[in-house]
Image (cartoon, helix red, strand yellow):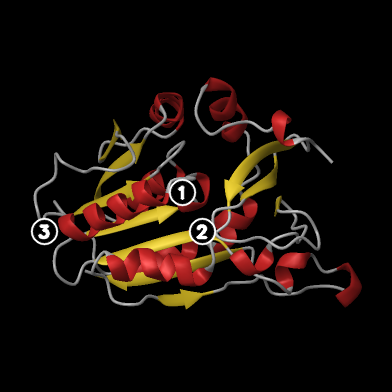
Amino acid sequence: MIADDDALGWDGSAAADAYRGRDMRLAEQLIFPAVLRRLAGRSGPGRLALDIGCGTGAVAALLAGTGTWTVQGLDPSADMLDIARTDRPHPRVSYRLFDGRTLDWLADASVDAAVCCLVYCTDPDDGRLAGLTAEIRRVLRPGAPYVLADLNPAATGVAFSTLRHGEPGARYDDGDTVTTLLRLRDGTMMTTATHYRSLDRYRSFLTEAGFPSPTVELPTLAAGGPAGAAPAETRTAPYMILTTRA
């Protein structure tokens, strides 16, 4: 067990450098295809998508590379954005520093889609997340999709191939800090902290901002090989994907 004092915060160059080397296989298999499915057929010249909390730019670059979206990748970490600009440049992606709460450079109903992947779980401040969710609702055109992917709150303590959030057998309440292990590509583990929120709390962020109640998907991987050797992600969803519309 690693003490919470040893956990990396999400801001700063040390976390950005570690996150750059994160093993993203499960996100690439379970989150990224779902995001693309939900935005399929909506891209077009001049259509704007937001990747909110873009980190090192994986989803922003994917959106631009598999469609004709113009993408703004937004993050409160200048160090994460520096890596995104270096590792994932694209002529239709612009990376922008923002405060995690406001989108005040964007007009009402001016955005065609928004995605937010593995962000809400990193922020301890419900008020900031409520403000951000309301801002996303404000800038989306009527009917535009909002796809919110995050850790599955029903999977705390489960040791997946590339992550574990929470201690086995522990019970968490909304707002609790959860020690989280992320596997890096070199086989080592990065220890950081996330913040537990129930599915009902996620729903309330959306409905209180004026979104309809979201659909919820809990994707797992297909099992292969002997049942006893199958990884946890074939039985339990590491992530949840919520989809709603403005």
**Is residue 65 at all visible to an observer of this figure?**
no
Q: Which residue is mark 2?
A: 150
Q: Residue at x 43, y 46 (%)?
A: 125
Q: Residue at x 25, y 41 (%)?
A: 92
Q: Which residue is mark 1?
A: 119
**Which mark is drawn over residue 2?**
none
Left/right placement of residue 245 relative to residue 151 reads left
Whichever of callouts 3 and 2 sits on the residue coming sooner in the sequence is 3
Secondary structure state at the residue bearing disc 3: loop
Image quadrant where residue 130 sits: bottom left
Left/right placement of residue 72 relative to residue 15 reads left
Q: Nearer the viewer, residue 110 or 103?
A: 103
Q: Amino acid at mark 3?
A: Ala
Secondary structure state at the residue bearing disc 2: strand
Q: Is residue 14 above or below residue 200?
A: above
| Relative image position of residue 168 (x, y in whole percent) | 80, 59
| Relative image position of residue 149 (x, y in whole percent) | 47, 60
Q: Which residue is mark 3?
A: 109
Q: Are marks 1 and 2 in contact (CB under 8 Å)?
A: yes
Q: Residue at x 42, y 39 (%)?
A: 57
Q: Are marks 1 and 3 in contact (CB under 8 Å)?
A: no
Q: Determine crowd level at label 1: few under 14, some 14-19, many 20+ residues with C-alpha closer than 10 A.
A: some
Whichever of callouts 1 and 3 sits on the residue coming sooner in the sequence is 3
Which quadrant of the rendered structure holds the N terminus? top right
| Relative image position of residue 16 (x, y in whole percent) | 54, 28
Q: Is residue 86 above or below residue 128?
A: above
